[in-house]
Amino acid sequence: MQFIDTHTHIYTEEFDADRAEVVARAQRAGARMLLLPNIDEASIAPMLRLCQEYPDFCHPMIGLHPTELPADPAPMLHRMEQMLQQADHPFVAVGEVGIDLYWDQSRREEQIATFAQQAEWAIRYHLPLMVHSRAAHHDLVETLLPLRKELTGVFHCFGGTAEEAEELLTTFPGFVLGIGGVVTFKKSKLPAVLHSTVPLNRIVVETDAPYLTPHPYRGERNEPSHIPLIIAKLAEIYNLPIEKMEYQLLENTLRTFPKLAISTP
């Protein structure tokens, strides 16, 4: 088994007690790389320390998560963009960015404006976009629509309908869907959506660790070593040998994140 976890937060405090063991388990499970989305300004330093400790294995992104907006996001966004302006910056994507209206819609306009600004970064600095969207499908599409021909990236943790999947993949040809542990849940409708609507070359795998742990470990802390469970479920959905599924997922990931420098097996 070989894989790239395209979205994991193992730099957070949930992994402080056993982070080295988590990395070792991921490598034993077949991980070639882990991609680390940023959340806010405070998370940049621990994320970069982890990437410096595992320089060819862990790769950072940078961006402001929609639920982490400070009262005035402009100074933080300015400092983040300054990091992207460095010629030797280590970031492989802009993210985790987007719109989240699930719990609170009071800052909807600010979330949209912040997301649009960071989408412009992705174009300006030639990076893919790692997109978080929750209860915001229409706003997501409307925000990115003017940039659709220039943007590439991942719609992270996709769990929508067949109609939403079709709209995203048709409207944004440079994007793929990030598929995580939800696909393994017993009552999940995602397997049917993937089977009916989503081409094999338009998906990548992710954990979103420590969240969204796949069956049969649901309820426990998630980690990258669980990715083979997701790949096995995808192989079942697409009726493919696991070896072919893992090869296709690696190919999709390397196409989406061109700064990653490995070759598929």
Image (cartoon, rainbow, N blue to C red):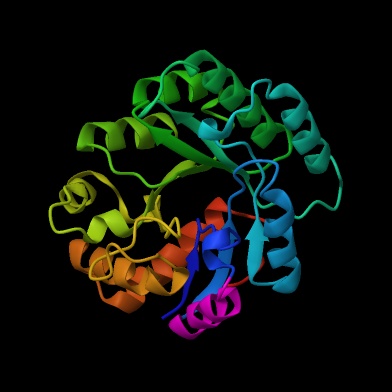
Main SS class of the magenta portion in the image: helix
Residue 247 is situated, as x and y percent measured from the top left of the image, at: 42, 71
Q: Is residue 101 magenta?
A: no
Rendered position, 53 above or below 177: below
Q: Quadrant of residue 74?
A: top right
Q: Is residue 178 left or right of residue 49?
A: left
- Residue at figure coordinates x 37%, y 37% from the top left: 169
Residue 38 visible to the viewer: yes
Segment colored magenta: 17-29
Residue 128 is situated, as x and y percent measured from the top left of the image, at: 59, 43
- Residue at figure coordinates x 29%, y 62% from the top left: 219
Residue furthest to the bottom in view is 28
Residue 197 is situated, as x and y percent measured from the top left of the image, at: 23, 44
Rendered position, 154 above or below 102: below
Q: Is residue 71 left or right of residue 254?
A: right
- Residue at figure coordinates x 57%, y 34% from the top left: 68
- Residue at figure coordinates x 23%, y 50% from the top left: 194
